[in-house]
Image (tube, rainbow, N blue to C red):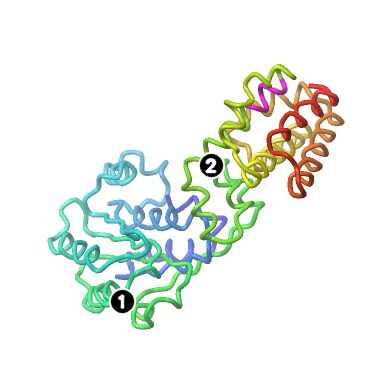
Amino acid sequence: MLDEFQSSQKIAYQMLKNSGTKQAFSHAYLIDANHYPRKLEFAMGLAKFILCPYHYSNNKQCNMCSQCQRIDDGNFTELKIISPDGSWIKKEQLEELQKQFSTKAIESKNKVYIINDAEKMNVSASNSILKFLEEPEPGIIAILITDNMYQLLDTIISRCQVISLSKINSKELSNSSSITSVEKIGFFLAKTGKDYQSFVQNDEIKEQIDSVIQFVQELESNGKQVILKENKLWTSHFRDKEQNDFGLEIMLLFYKDMINQKIGLPIEFMDDYKEILKQLAESNTMKQICQKIETLIELKKHLRVNANNNLLIDQLILSFQEVGV
């Protein structure tokens, strides 16, 4: 819940905790996300804090609360999440929201709606939500999330309490056990918040990362015999130069985390594969790991110049064999 963000979002967290202590929630919050990768999770933490009958901000405190459990399960009637339908949030979506929220809350004292990527409301949708904000019904609380606050109407901004989130730094991200490897890799590789969202929502990327780790396991365990599984584990997932470069980048991050495992530093990216890291770190010397990293860096350079994709992995396998697997 909200306590997850106590360290990474100290100011925003404390403001909202104070509101809960005083039972003085605003009728509308505008979360200026600043490309924070967990912006929707933060908004959900706030929604649960508001809707929980005890206003707990920690899941451990709230393990007996059916409301919070049903929010986690996605079937709590007093919470509605609206996201873009295609490229835009449309007027019809907000009209349906207002229709659903026209009745009194039954399961909670409050009703909460979250509008994700609020800057994507078209003109009609913006005017529709503005009317909803201008004449707030008791017990209805809005949470708008945006990475581009000034794309919203000034009149919408003026009717909300603005909560500005801080950009998360890589150290905080690395130390967070609640963030998946895909999210950590996405944060490292993505150039913008939009790129990050596209990355973590792409199911193919998760499959590619899993495939790379399986390939590494086979390579480390069976050496040249991995060629027999090369098509299944690599070629079918990485079909062009850009995708091959991505696959090599994932391998680089894996072997860098192997060094962290070897010397007792926190895992930066591959938390989901800790057991594999531990096993392979034990079977490699530090010199071997460093040589493999150097090999991957060289292959990435060749790939960007004019390497043959079909021969790339064969060269990788042979080079690793020379190092020792």
Residue denoted by label 1:
123
Quarter of the image for residue 104 reads bottom left
Left or right: where 148 falls relative to 308: left
Left or right: where 279 falls relative to 205: right
Quarter of the image for residue 179 reads top right
Which residues make up the magenta segment?
A: 215-220
Query: In the structure shown, which secondary structural element does the residue marked by tag 2 occupy?
Result: helix
Label 2 Cα neighbours within 10 Å, binned few <14 / some 14-19 / many ≥20: some
Position of residue 75 relative to residue 159, above or below, is above
| Front-lying residue, 4 or 189 | 189
Q: Residue at x 37, y 66 (%)?
A: 144
Q: Residue at x 38, y 61 (%)?
A: 116
Label 1 Cα neighbours within 10 Å, binned few <14 / some 14-19 / many ≥20: some
Q: Residue at x 67, y 43 (%)?
A: 268
Residue 324 in the magenta stretch? The answer is no
Question: What secondary structure is the stretch in magenta mostly built from?
Answer: helix
Residue denoted by label 2:
205
